[in-house]
Every structure is written in structure tokens, then in C-alpha cells.
Image (cartoon, rainbow, N blue to C red):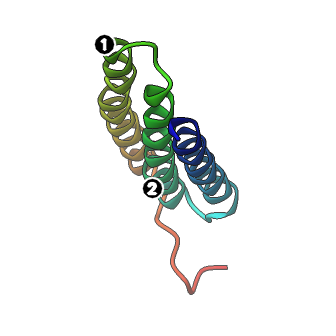
Amino acid sequence: MTDWISAALLFVGAFFYAAGTLGLLRFPDVYSRLHALAKADNLGLGFVLLGLALQAESIAAGLKILLIWPLALAASAGVGYAIARRADSLGVKPWHKDQP
């Protein structure tokens, strides 16, 4: 049963990674692309890590795997902020519907 749950979590995680990649390729500006990557990829990572933690050899190993997620969340927030701040300092304006 654990294998099926783990496989389902890994599949859901892969779906969110694919959705984030699609957002990166399809969204019109840097700000919406950052939003897609930060939200979808972090959620995908959470599901993948949960699926992997279920397959861990011990509880300690599973908890170590799960500790990756908060570190990645903090790194994603910091990098996303730095990219958005740099884009703003370069004068990159957010996309609006009336723009070509």
C-alpha cells in the first residue's frame, strides 16, 4: 500500500513540476513566470519529497528528506525576490492585458 501512495505522490509532484514549466514557457512577463515557478515547483517538490520519504529506510532518513523542503522554500523566496527586484530596477514593467 505504501508503494501505491508513494507512486501517487510522485505522480502529483511531477504534474506540478510540469505545470510550473508550462507557466514558465507560456506566461508573458518575468513576474508571472516567477509566480508560476515559485508556487507550482515548490508544491511539486513537497509532493515528491513526501513520496520519497515514504520509501525511506528509516524514520530519521525520511525526516532528513523532508527537511529539504523548508530549505528549498526559503531559497526560492530569496531568489524570486532578487530576480523581481532586479527586473524592477531595470525598468521591466508588469504585463497588462491591453499591451501587445
Given residues 37 and 44, the one toward you in this image is 44
Q: Which mark is residue 35?
A: 2
Q: Which mark is residue 60?
A: 1
Gap between marks 2 and 1 measured at Cα: 33 Å
Instruction: Give the secondary structure at mark 2.
Output: helix
Residue at 51% x, 78% y: name it. Answer: 96
Dot 2 crowding, Cα within 10 Å, few <14, some 14–19, many 20+: some
Given residues 91 and 53, the one toward you in this image is 53
Q: Quadrant of the C terminus?
A: bottom right
Q: Residue furthest front?
A: 1
Residue at 50% x, 28% y: name it. Answer: 52
Q: Estimate the x, y position of residue 26 in percent, counting from the top left.
A: 68, 63
Task: From the viewer's perspective, tell me whether residue 21 is left or right of residue 65.
Answer: right
Q: Which mark is residue 94?
A: none
Amino acid type at mark 1:
Ala
Residue at 61% x, 57% y: name it. Answer: 19
Amino acid type at mark 2:
His
Mark nearer the N terminus (2 vs 1): 2
Instruction: Indicate the quadrant where residue 66 lies.
Output: top left
